[in-house]
Structure formats: structure tokens, C-alpha cells
């Protein structure tokens, strides 16, 4: 499973890359960090992830979805109120 992280809590990691970075990996880090978009970047031998940005994006999406849900419920209640009068 190269180029993809294992899921959280996975206990079996076949073909997992060792934690020690080779010299070429260390030399490739500046280029990988230059390409890093703040959330996720894949290189040949490692993945750069910012979990804080990912969490903030997830929370923001959840808040927006909840706000849209509440707004739609309010609109539906207003329409029902107008039709019942």
C-alpha cells in the first residue's frame, strides 16, 4: 500500500516503510515541503500530513453542514406556518 497511510488503529502494516529516512529522503524533504498544500502531500517514500489543518477543515465542514440544516428547518417551519394560516 505505497503512497497511502494505514488507517488509524490498524495493527497490521505489511510492507510498511521503516521510520528511518535515507539520505535521499532527507534531501527530498525541502521539495516535498515546498509542494505541501497545508493538508496532505505524497512523496515517493513518505507522506506529509498536517492533522491540525485536517481537523479544522473537518470541524468547519461540520459546522457549515449543521448551519445549513438548521436554516432549512427554519425555512420549512416558516412555510408551514404561512400555509396553515
Image (cartoon, rainbow, N blue to C red):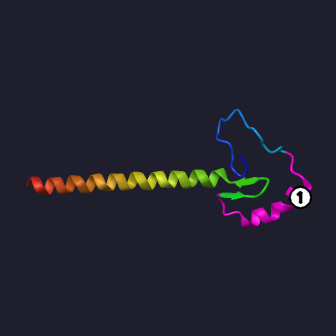
Instruction: Please state which of residues 84 and 17 is positioned toward the viewer in this rendering.
Output: 17
**Residue at 75 percent of width and 67 percent of height:** 34
Q: Is residue 48 left or right of residue 80?
A: right
Q: Main secondary structure of the magenta part?
A: helix
- Which quarter of the picture shows residue 44? bottom right
Q: Which residue is mark 1?
A: 24
- Which quarter of the picture shows residue 75? bottom left
Q: Is residue 32 left or right of residue 61?
A: right
Residue 29 placement (x, y as % from top left) = 82, 60
Residue 71 placement (x, y as % from top left) = 32, 56
Residue located farthest toward the right when viewing the structure as drawn:
23
Residue 9 placement (x, y as % from top left) = 65, 35
Q: In the structure shown, which secondary structural element does the residue marked by tag 1 occupy?
A: helix
Q: Mark 1 packing: few (<14 Cα in 10 Å), some, or many (20+)? A: few
Instruction: Please state which of residues 6 and 31 is positioned toward the viewer in this rendering.
Output: 6
* Label total for image: 1
**Residue at 91 percent of width and 56 percent of height:** 23
Identify the image quadrant of the C terminus.
bottom left
Write down the region rendered in magenta. Answer: 20-39
Amino acid at each position: 500500500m505505497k503512497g497511502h497511510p494505514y488507517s488509524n488503529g490498524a495493527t497490521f502494516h505489511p510492507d510498511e516503510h521503516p521510520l528511518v529516512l535515507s539520505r535521499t529522503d532527507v534531501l527530498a524533504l525541502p521539495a516535498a515541503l515546498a509542494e505541501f498544500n497545508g493538508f496532505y502531500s505524497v512523496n515517493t517514500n513518505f507522506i506529509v500530513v498536517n492533522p491540525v489543518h485536517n481537523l479544522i477543515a473537518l470541524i468547519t465542514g461540520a459546522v457549515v453542514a449543521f448551519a445549513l440544516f438548521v436554516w432549512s428547518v427554519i425555512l420549512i417551519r416558516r412555510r408551514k406556518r404561512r400555509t396553515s394560516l
